[in-house]
Image (tube, rainbow, N blue to C red):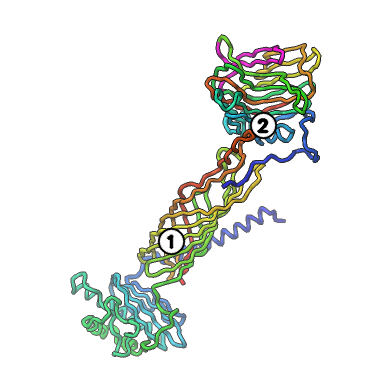
Amino acid sequence: MTSPFVQRFDSRLARSAAIGCLLVGLFVTARAAAAPRPSIDLRWEAPQGCPQESDVRGRIQKILGSGRHDSPLRAEGTITRTDGRFRLDLVVQIGGVAGTRTLVSKSCEDLAGAAAVEVGLLIHSVEAGTKAEPAGNPPPTLPPVGEPGTSGSGSEGTTGLSSQGTKDASTTERASDISKPVGESEVKKQAEVESEAGEPPPRAESQRRWHVLLQAPLVALGVGPLPPLAMGVGLSLGFEYAHWQLYLRGLSWRRQNVPASDFPGYGADVDRIGAAFGICREYRVSWFGLSPCLGAGLERVTASGTGSNILPSSQKLLGMNAGAGVQGRIHLASWIRLLVAVAGEIELIRPQISIEGLGILAPPPTGDPPDPPTPVYRFAPAALTGTLSLEWAL
Amino acid sequence: MVVGEYQCPESNLDDASPPSSTDPVSVPWQTGFENGACDYQQVSGFCYRFPPAVFRVVTSPVHTGQYAAEITIVTGTDAGAQPQGRCVRQGVLPPEAYYGAWFYVPKPATNNGLWNLMFLQGGNADTTSIHALWNVSLVNDAATGELTLLLQNRSGTSGVSPPIPVGRWFHVVFYLKRAKDESGVAALYLDEQKVVELANLVTDDSDWAQWYVGNLADDVSPPECTVYVDDVTIRSTL
């Protein structure tokens, strides 16, 4: 026969183990993400059966030749299947400037080849430009692909770095020269790829600069405005555009019993549910992002007196706070991040919790004004909240 | 936000009949103010204050438990001739009993009038014929100025104790063996030592009485005087 304690212990153990496994998984993923990246900064996502990141990376390396290539170029390629065909969205960033190319083909193999050639040629171009030209010159554009009319130019402005707007002829020339010795067959294949010009991509599939964000599950630990430590759970919905994030967070704190400091055994049970709005700006380096944030919130406080001989009365009040904080993001994948945040808040309204008659041994004589309620606890002027959550970029 | 109200339960008795002020005073009985004034209210007693007075529970100093009563009064104001805060047990007193309480006087003071700690008055429960019977008060020793206890009845019979300790708890017990003829006995104990005994006298002339414990003063210097009270008892033995 298992005692209730053992059952409870087992249940806790199982829960702890599950949470532990999840955390270990996250850390392993984070460690993998944190491992030194190859010199080519490439992110690649493709359906099963298509060439994966290692394949594309190998092809690029083949184009570039041996040796290390520390290019400032960063490429993100995503192949998706649409109506029986494959579509490549290739985003290339150099410094603060980004360019997008979209290609459609019946073969994802061809798309992978095309992407490898483009990235390889661009890295070459950048390296050549860095050596030949003084610093500060604009970075090269995406090279043309094959024959005019088959390239991904055009209708959506998908070719070329967005800040440039037009192709750089000298870069194009250079790219063509380089392509011949290192990957002629690859370039040929790329030329066979159909352009998506005149065939706008499905909106949901496009490479976007904006995302809907969902932070869930979200757990919180708070110091203040009530003693002792507070624990809460919640979720957050947000919107991300480029490096800016707006969010609306809901947080339900576990009930806290606030003791009356002058009256042992007496106090109040306090429930808090809060909603906060915030804005953050992310500064990202590779897989890690740091975001200073500003926010303001409303909190519904419900309190009820506790203690021997207390006739409780549940009272509600709306609190307000404003604060600033910082969020740290570990980008586990393009669609999920581990988020750790710390925020300091100033309480704009500091409720005073009181109990009538507590500690009073005799009422005032008839006709005298009644005694004021006995103070139990006043909300602290500031609070510190730490949160841990998964953030889903939708 | 006022999240509740301190209220004494109606009664701690199993039967539904509420306590009456004419009920016999049961022995033993005690309160340490752990439940505020509820221990009094549940036996038809009560606590009261006349301003200017603060009458509340405190967590320091305490004799035992978590709470004691603090009674701070200010004499010499226009607010009242006899500021006071006291608790009262009432009913038919036992033929013989020890009425005790622990007191704490935090600092010395000079009493130029009345400074009462315990008071017994008799009469009828309808309060139409109430009259003083016994007082236990603080008086200054004429020679040293130290505070001592004075036990006195309404006819002026009295006795004085040695000085009380200031700044620590001391135990005062008033012993009363009631008699309507001259066979009664009254005594006073200070920290378990008998310091006054008055015998062969009429102690009271009525069955019903009220026993007050607290702090009442009309002319004390300095005018603000505080007395702490804890562990009030009525027992059949010391």
Q: Is residue B38 above or below residue A393?
A: above
Quarter of the image where one finds residue B31: top right
Task: State if disc 2 and disc 1 touch (CB < 8 Å).
Answer: no
Foreground disc of the pair 1, 2: 2
Q: Is residue A366 or residue A39 the one in the foreground?
A: A366
Query: Can I make out residue A25 in this image?
Result: no
User: Residue tagged by mark 1?
Assistant: A278
Describe residue A319's horizontal placement relative to residue A209 as left or right: right
Residue A162 against residue B167 in the figure, above or below:
below
User: The N terminus of chain A appears in which quarter of the rendering?
Assistant: bottom right
Which residue, given by chain and number where applicable, does mark 2 sit on?
B47
Q: Badge 1 sits on which subunit?
A: A
Residue drawn at (45%, 83%) of the image: A81
Is label 2 in a helix, a strand or a loop?
strand
| Residue B109 versus residue A233 in the image, above or below | above
Q: Residue at x 43, y 79 (%)?
A: A46
Three-letter code, disc 2: Cys
Q: Is residue B146 magenta?
A: yes
Left or right: where B71 falls relative to B91: left
Q: Position of residue B183 (x, y in %)?
A: 80, 13
Residue B147 left/right relative to A288: right
Chain letter of mark 2 equals B
The residue positioned 56% from the left and 9% from the top of the image is B143
Local SS, label 1 = strand
The part of the chain drawn in magenta is B144-167
